[in-house]
């Protein structure tokens, strides 16, 4: 079976890896660069049970376990580690023990997560490691822009990449927020981009494995939810300040909103004197793929056809990437049959987006 995967983010790379484990010839087609978008600029935070009670609980729990197995399984290092996770707000006073945080940060008494339930990866390194492992098993990465899905007799036959038609038995749409462009080629629900800004600091050994989720109010009144993730490589990632700024068609054209980075730098200096004094390695923005109901789109668009078409959009895509497409053995096949994709994540649950609306944007 030949599968073409449109989009080289964490979802495309994870699908390529798990397909290659089953001997499927997978090719990832990426327009700009592997992990150039949210998959390279997100937090990489993972939680075992934060999707409990939602249709994603099994997917998230299975993915959390797979993240722990992956470094050994693919023999690569992408900054995976367990961590303790705290919640709180800025503007109070508490006698917390996180010496790198400002005393004006008040933390909840009970951590949000322990080393048993929360962890992290470096998302760009994870995506690259998955793609490397897939390539070792025969998968390919091809740079190019997908501009069309080719059909005949009501069946998907392949895609057009930079003017050339590539044939396939199945096509996967994994273009993150750019998946909305695929509504011009297939009847699919809309995927939208929610922009987020982030900074990466060089903090060395000053910040231990402690993730922090805070509430913060700017002097002007705007409220934000900064998330702080110290990483194993001696950097600390902070994201906050979401916006609904338009998604550029070209992923390479994504840039921070005017003033957002300066506001984020001010916020970080207030939250932590260590961050206030640390060199900044990256000032960046990216778009999180979101759907109308907040759940991912996972599954075949036209179920009865032999050639399936799948479509993904993940709010917590780094966490959920491994189990989005998994299956590498007979025993696993039996288990998968028992755990069919819940109806809640199938693309057919939402109405197709009218691509004429793209022209109006
Ligand atoms: C600020 C922020 C923080 C986040 N933090 C976390 C977190 O801590 N934990 C977590 O689990 N999730 C987090 N997320 C969410 C996570 O980053 C995303 O869900 C995930 O990266 C989406 O991966 P993807 O592969 O679907 O899309 P993307 O990473 O957007 O990849 C899509 C790819 O498709 C390519 N593409 C687009 N158009 C074409 C085309 N025509 N042809 C070929 N290729 C094309 C793009 O160049 C891009 O590389 C965060 C998101 C944001 C914005």
Image (cartoon, rainbow, N blue to C red):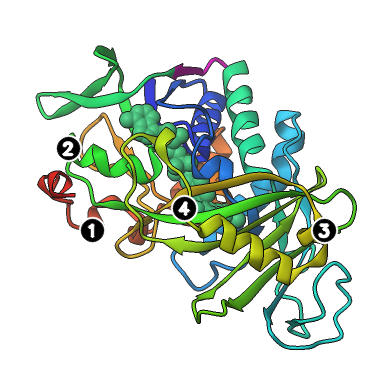
- The residue at 26%/29% (across/down) is 307
Q: What element carries label 2?
A: helix
Distance Cα–Cα, label 2 vs label 4: 34 Å
Mark 3 crowd level (few <14, some 14–19, many ≥20, 10 Å Cα): some
Work out whether mark 1 precedes mark 3 in sequence or the reverse, and give the earlier one.
3
Check the picture and name the quadrant holding the N terminus. Answer: top left
**Residue toward you, 91 or 94:** 91
Residue 156: quarter of image: top left
Distance Cα–Cα, label 1 vs label 2: 16 Å
Q: Which mark is residue 350?
A: 1
Residue 311: quarter of image: top left
Q: Mark 3 points at which residue?
A: 209
Is residue 59 visible to the viewer in this orientation of the structure? Answer: no
Distance Cα–Cα, label 4 vs label 3: 37 Å
Q: Mark 4 points at which residue?
A: 338
Residue 256 located within the stretch drawn in magenta: no
Work out whether mark 1 precedes mark 4 in sequence or the reverse, and give the earlier one.
4
């Amino acid at each position: 079976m030949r599968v073409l995967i449109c989009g080289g983010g964490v979802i495309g790379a994870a699908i390529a890896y798990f397909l290659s484990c089953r001997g499927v010839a997978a090719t990832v087609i990426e327009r700009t660069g592997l992990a150039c978008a949210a998959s390279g600029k997100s937090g990489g935070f993972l939680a075992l049970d934060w999707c409990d009670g939602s249709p994603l609980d099994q997917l998230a729990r299975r993915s959390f376990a797979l993240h722990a197995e992956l470094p050994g399984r693919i023999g690569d290092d992408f900054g995976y580690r367990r961590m303790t996770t705290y919640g709180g707000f800025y503007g109070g006073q508490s006698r917390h023990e996180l010496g790198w945080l400002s005393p004006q940060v008040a933390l909840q008494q009970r951590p949000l997560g322990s080393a048993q339930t929360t962890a992290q990866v470096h998302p760009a390194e994870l995506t690259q490691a998955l793609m490397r492992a897939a390539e070792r098993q025969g998968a390919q990465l091809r740079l190019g822009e997908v501009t069309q899905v080719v059909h005949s007799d009501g069946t998907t036959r392949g895609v057009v990449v930079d003017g050339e038609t590539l044939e396939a038995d199945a096509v996967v749409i994994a273009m993150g927020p750019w998946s909305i462009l695929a509504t011009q080629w297939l009847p699919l629900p809309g995927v939208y981009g929610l922009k987020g800004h982030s900074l990466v600091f060089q903090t060395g050994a000053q910040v231990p494995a402690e993730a922090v989720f805070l509430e913060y109010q700017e002097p002007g009144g705007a409220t934000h939810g900064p998330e702080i993730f110290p990483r194993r490589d001696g950097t600390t990632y902070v994201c906050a300040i979401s916006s609904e700024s338009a998604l550029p068609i070209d992923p390479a054209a994504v840039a921070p909103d005017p003033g957002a980075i300066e506001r984020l730098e001010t916020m970080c200096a207030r939250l932590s004197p260590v961050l206030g004094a640390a060199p900044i390695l990256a000032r960046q923005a990216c778009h999180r793929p979101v759907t109308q109901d907040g759940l991912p789109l996972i599954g075949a668009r036209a179920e009865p056809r032999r050639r399936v078409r799948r479509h993904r959009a993940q709010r917590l895509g780094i966490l959920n990437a491994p189990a989005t497409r998994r299956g590498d053995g007979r025993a696993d096949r039996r288990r998968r049959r028992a755990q069919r994709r819940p109806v809640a994540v199938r693309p057919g649950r939402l109405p197709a987006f009218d691509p004429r609306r793209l022209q109006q944007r």
